[in-house]
Amino acid sequence: IWFFGLPFLPGARQHPSPAARPGINLVTYEGGRPSGYVLQQLAPEDVDWTPGSLTWRFADSLFRAEVDDGRVRLDASLDLVLPAPGGRWQGALHVEGPRCRFDGGGAGDDPSGEHGWSPFTCFAHGSLELQAPGRAPFSLAGRAYFDTNASQRPLHGLGIADWRWGRYAFDDHEFIYYLVWPEK
């Protein structure tokens, strides 16, 4: 996850601007258990992104998405600082699949433009290769999904009390839901 103002960060409700809290979160799992974790918070000046662009630079990591002829491709070059002194995760992420067809209403169709959620690709294929000093290389390949969730204001500033997101992957399609409950 590369983000501006991740709502799960401590103190998220005290920060009025999501752009003031960029970062990257990456968790790896092996055998159903977390095997690696990094949450890299960055200074706003360490991020280069133009609204509407599909290229993001977060410190030394670069994410680039392309949408062409109904297909989506995401390539990321990762260089993440680990909590251990001198530690870094370096590697590459690749996701490619059909552009999602989004049926029905929801946050992706928010007429106010205040909160936008949109699946980019689902039923896609992805691969991840990571290397860290003193650790065996980590690689993963399989089913992938890529979405965006954006707002100029933090979620708590949009009148959202709670939300749930989930995805069910079937052999020939995916079911994705995003539910939002308003504050009372």
Image (spheres, rainbow, N blue to C red):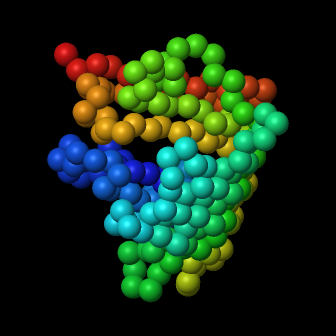
Residue 16 rendering spot, x and y as whole percentages: 23, 45
* Res 68 visible: yes
Judging depth in this view, the residue of 52 and 16 nearest the camera is 52
Residue 62 rendering spot, x and y as whole percentages: 58, 64
Task: Please report the residue visible at 45 percent of the width from the left and 57 percent of the height from the top.
Answer: 25
Say if 74 sits above or below 124 in the image: below
Q: State the image quarter where residue 102 is shown.
A: top right
Task: Please report the residue visible at 63 percent of the width from the left and 66 percent of the height from the top.
Answer: 77
Left or right? Give the position of 158 relative to 38.
left
Left or right? Give the position of 166 relative to 156.
right
Say if 59 sits above or below 153 in the image: below
Which image quarter holds the C terminus?
top left
* Res 165 visible: no
Judging depth in this view, the residue of 145 and 23 nearest the camera is 23
Say if 14 sits above or below 161 in the image: below
Residue located farthest toward the right when viewing the structure as drawn = 69
Residue 163 rendering spot, x and y as whole percentages: 37, 27
Task: Please report the residue visible at 47 percent of the width from the left and 30 percent of the height from the top.
Answer: 116
Residue 161 rendering spot, x and y as whole percentages: 26, 26
